[in-house]
Amino acid sequence: MAEQDMVVFEAASMEEARQIASERLGLAPEDFMVTVREEGRRFFGLLGKKNTYQAAPVAPRHLLRVREVVRQMARRMGVDVDVVFGEEDGVDLRGTDREMLLGTYGEPLRALEYLVNIMLREPLEGRWVRFDSEGFREHRQAHLEEAARQAASEAVRRRRPISLDPMTSWERRVVHVALKDNAEVETRSVGEEPTRRVVVWPQKNVARASTGKMVYRTRLPR
């Protein structure tokens, strides 16, 4: 927790303390852990007692802002989705309506990740918060790695380049990493977003890849 995220002040009650912390740091009142640092005293029984409180966010501020934006979106959409903080700069989406954010191949989840990160570009200060939902990314990564291995086998067997479906930058990286130690093939990203894809070439055909030779396509396993 950064030292500048902790604030100390006087307040008449715990509720007022949360509200003051909220106004000072721009977070929701429930996002703070508030403790009494020093108890105040009444003077001659006439003046109200004010305690000195110490308040600090329950998580990094940039992740709390991400959670608040997602909650606001969920409320407007009328869906039951909440945010649980994951490892490093990651959040995990849970709730009875989480399947709506996964779609068939995770496109809504990736779109939400992109939208929220763009909306909070300044508060995030160059960070990129990854979105997941109960292990979906791990499951997707396993499918991509299997697709990469199948494409490599097919490229070597047919001695022709094999093109995978369009993918996000993260998905393309998974494919590149999965095949980086395979001496029989080489991978390259081709095309422009949003149809940029990975092409797997057998090593003998890499030098001829720019000659206009037909590229065979294969669909990802789902």
Image (cartoon, rainbow, N blue to C red):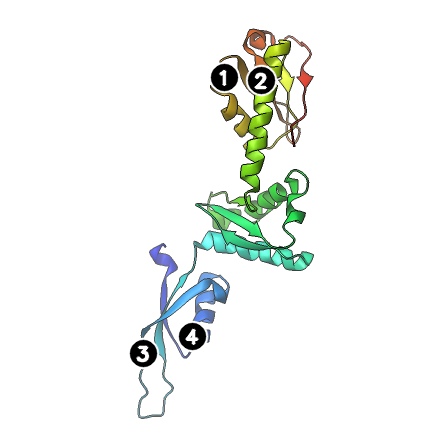
| Residue 152's disc number | 2
Do the residues bearing badges 1 and 2 touch, measured as CB atoms within 8 Å? yes
Rounded to the nearest angstrom, the CA distance separating label 1 from label 2 is 8 Å
What SS does tag 3 mark?
A: loop
State the residue in front, 103 or 63: 103
Q: Which residue corresponds to mark 3?
A: 39
Residue that appears at 38% across and 86% down: 48
How far apart in space, not on screen, are marks 2 and 4 (Cα)?
Answer: 62 Å
Q: Position of residue 21 (x, y in %)?
A: 43, 67
Q: Which of marks 4 and 3 precedes in the sequence? A: 4
> Spatial distance from mark 3 to mark 1, Cα to Cα?
67 Å
Say which quarter of the image contains residue 141. top right
Three-letter amino acid code at the position of disc 4:
Met
**Image disc number at residue 205:** none
Q: Residues within 10 Å of mark 4 (few under 14, many from 20)?
A: some
User: Mark 2 touching mark 4, by CB under 8 A?
Assistant: no
Which is more N-terminal, label 4 or label 2? 4
Q: Height in image: 77 above or below 44?
A: above
Left or right for 59, reference 174: left
Q: Residues within 10 Å of mark 3 (few under 14, many from 20)?
A: few
Secondary element under disc 2, as helix, strand or loop, is: helix
Q: Position of residue 74 (x, y in %)?
A: 63, 56
Q: CA distance from mark 1 to mark 4?
A: 61 Å
Question: What residue does disc 4 label?
Answer: 14
Q: Residue at point 34% right, 92% down?
A: 45
Q: Which residue is mark 1?
A: 182
Between discs 1 and 4, the one toward the N terminus? 4
Badge 1: residue crowd in 10 Å (few <14, some 14–19, many ≥20):
few
- Point out the tag, 2 or 3, that comes first from the N-terminus: 3
Residue 189 in sight: no
- Quarter of the rendering occupied by the C terminus: top right
